Amino acid sequence: MRIGELARRAGVSERMLRYYEQEGLLQPLRAVSGYRDYGEMEIQAAQRIRMLSAAGLKIETIRILLPCILDNQPRFVPCNEVRAALRREVEKMDERLRDLGESRLIVAGFLDGVEAAVNGDRPSRPA
């Protein structure tokens, strides 16, 4: 199938499919005419790449992870390198969640202050 059909069936833009190929994540066959020729497996691969990217994984991590995934279920070939990469990603996500929680507390505090001011509960000003 051509890139347009793959894009439609996988729910990924043609531009992203070309990027995935450029990054070595997809390796379509080339017809004599030079056109990319994608098979059914590329549909699953493109969907998997999109899902992993949406989950926050960087292309470098996805490149390591893809060869270890057996199918669309979370079943894997034993890959120690993948385990270490995924641990690092989970640690980074945990750190971002902590930072986001702290940011939320700060913004919520400002919101409480603004709402109090709007409701007429203005703090007294120093004399």
Image (spheres, rainbow, N blue to C red):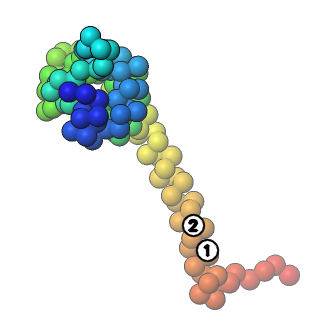
* Picture quadrant of residue 62: top left
Amino acid type at image mark 1: Gly
From the top left corner, tell me how far across and down residue 53 is, in percent.
Answer: 36, 35
Most foreground residue, 96 or 13? 13
Vertical placement of residue 6 versus 96, above or below: above
Vertical placement of residue 2 versus 112, above or below: above
Most foreground residue, 45 or 51? 45
Question: How far apart are labels 1 and 2 at the CA level?
Answer: 6 Å
* Picture quadrant of residue 82: top left
Most foreground residue, 64 or 18? 18
- Report the residue marked by disc 1: 113
- Pick out the residue farthest to the front: 33
- Report the residue marked by disc 2: 109
Q: Quadrant of the N terminus?
A: top left
Whether label 1 touches label 2, CB < 8 Å: yes
Q: Residue at x 62, y 84 (%)?
A: 118
Amino acid type at image mark 2: Gly
Query: In the image, 19: left or right of 12?
Result: right
From the top left corner, tell me how far across and down residue 120 is, in percent.
Answer: 63, 89
